[in-house]
Amino acid sequence: MTAHAELQAVLDRAAAGGRITPQEALDLYRFAPLHALGAAADAVRRRRYAGTEHIATYIIERNINYTNVCVTACKFCAFYAAPKDGEKGWSRDLDDILKRCAETVELGGTQIMFQGGHHPDYGVEYYEEHFSAIKKAFPQLVIHSLGASEVEHMARISGVSAEEAIRRIHAAGLDSFAGAGAELLPERPRKAIAPLKESGERWLEIMEIAHRLGVESTSTMLMGTGETNAERIEHIRMIREVQDRTGGFRAFIPYTYQPENNKLKGQTQATIFEYLRMIAIARLFLDNVAHIQGSWLTVGKEAGQLSLHYGADDLGSVMLEENVVSSAGARHRSNRMELLHLIRAAGRVPAQRATTYEHLVVHEDPANDPVDDRVVSHVSSTAIAGGTAHPELKLIDAK
Ligand code: SF4
C-alpha cells in the first residue's frame, strides 16, 4: 500500500468511528491532505449530530476579570501584573463584579467566565464569597470558570487539598470549570512558556478529581508558542486518556497564541492551516469528547467559519467582555447579528446554546433574528494597549 493509501485507510477508519492511535494522529496531522482531513472530520461531526448536523451553536457570555495580579508570570501572558509591579495591578470589588453580572443578564447572557490572575491573597474563601454572592443575586447565571491552575493556587493559599477546594467552591456556586491553564500539557513546552504553573499531569489530576465530584469542564490547548507537532498530539492524547476514565470534558477548544505585549519573543503564531488541521485531528482523535469548538476570537471570523467544515460544531461565544487574549493582540470582534450571519454563510443554522450545549434558541428564520445590537463582543482599549490599566467598566452600550 502506498503512503497515501495508508493515510486514507486511517482516515476512512476514523471517519467511520474507529479509534486512531497517537502515531496515526501525528501522521495524519503532518501528511494528510487538508481537504481529506476536513472531509473525514466533518463526517464524524455529521454522524455524531445526526438530525441536528445542520446546526452550529454559540453562547452569550461575559468574561469577568477579577484581578490581573498574578504570581505565576507565564511568559505568553500579556494580562498579568506581578505583585511587585505596584499600581499596574488591580482587582475589582464585589459591587463592580455584580454590576457586570447584572449587565450580562440584561443582555441575555447565560454564563460568566470568572477569569484572573493567581493573586497571592486569594484562597478558597475569596472564591466562596464571590460565587455565593453572584448566585444569590443571579441564580440564573451559570458560573463556568477557572481551571486546575486556579484550584492548585487557591488550595495552596488556604492550606487545603485540591479536592476540598473544589468541593467548597462548587458548593458556593461554581457550576463547571472552563479548563483554563491547560496551555500545553507535555512537560517541555509547558516549562518553556509557564515554568511556574503546575505540571500537565497535575492539571489533569485536578480535572479528574473535579469530574469525579460531578464538576464537568471543557478542555483547551494553546497553539503556536514553539511546540512541535508531536507535542500537540501528545497534549490531546493526555486529554483522551483522562476522558476515557471520567467522561467529564464536554468540549475541546484549541486556540492560537497571540504574540503581542508578552515575554515570548520571536515565537510565531500557529498558521490558520495548522489550526484547521488541529480542529480536524481533534474531531477524529477525541472520539470520547462531545464538542469541538472553533475559536473565532483568536483566529478570526473566516477561519472560525472554516472550522465548522473541519469538525467543529460550536463557534464559541459572543463575549460581552474579554481582556486576556486581547491584551496579547487578538483583534477580532463580533456581535450577535454578525455571528448569526457568519454561521449561516458557512451553511449552518445558528443556535444559541446553554453551557451544557442544549439549544436555547434555534435561529431557523433570519426574519426572526434578534435585533438587539447591544449584544456585542467588546474589549477595553486599555487592555489592547497592554493591560496595564484598569479596564473601563461601561463597555457594552453599542449606541
Ligand atoms: S496566564 Fe494566568 S496564571 Fe499565567 S501569568 Fe497570566 S494570569 Fe497568571
Image: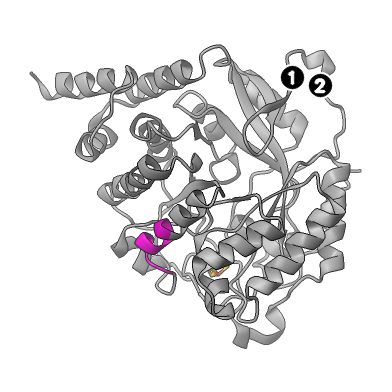
User: Badge 1: few (under 14), some or many (20 or more) residues near its Cα, within 10 Å?
Assistant: some
* Number of numbered callouts drawn: 2
Name the side, left or right, on which 135 lies relative to 127.
Answer: right
Q: Is residue 197 left or right of residue 85?
A: left
Specify the farthest residue to the right. Answer: 399
Q: Quick check: is the Cβ at mark 2 less than 8 Å away from ligand 1?
A: no
**As displayed, is residue 177 above or below residue 314?**
below
Residue 252 percent location from the top left of the image: 47, 41
Residue 360 in view (yes/no)? yes
Q: Residues within 10 Å of mark 2 (few under 14, many from 20)?
A: few
**Is residue 181 placed above or below 29 in the rendered structure?**
below
Q: Is residue 278 above or below residue 103?
A: above
**383 is higher (above) or lower (below) than 307:** below
Which stretch did the figure color magenta? Answer: 198-205
Given residues 241 and 270, the one toward you in this image is: 241
Residue plotted at (54% across, 47% down): 217
Residue 363's disc number = 1
The quadrant where residue 284 appears? top left
Q: Residue at x 39, y 56 (%)?
A: 184
Which quadrant would residue 40 be assigned to in this image? top left
Using residue 202 as the reference point, say whether residue 66 is left or right of it.
right
Mark 2 sits on what residue?
369
For the rendered model, the colour scheme is one colour
CB within 8 Å, label 1 to label 2: yes
Give the main secondary structure, helix, strand or loop, of the magenta stretch.
helix
Residue 134 magenta-drawn?
A: no
Please tell me whether mark 2 sits on a helix, a strand or a loop: loop
Tag 1, which secondary structure? loop
Q: Residue 326: x and y, percent?
A: 63, 56
The disc at residue 338 is none
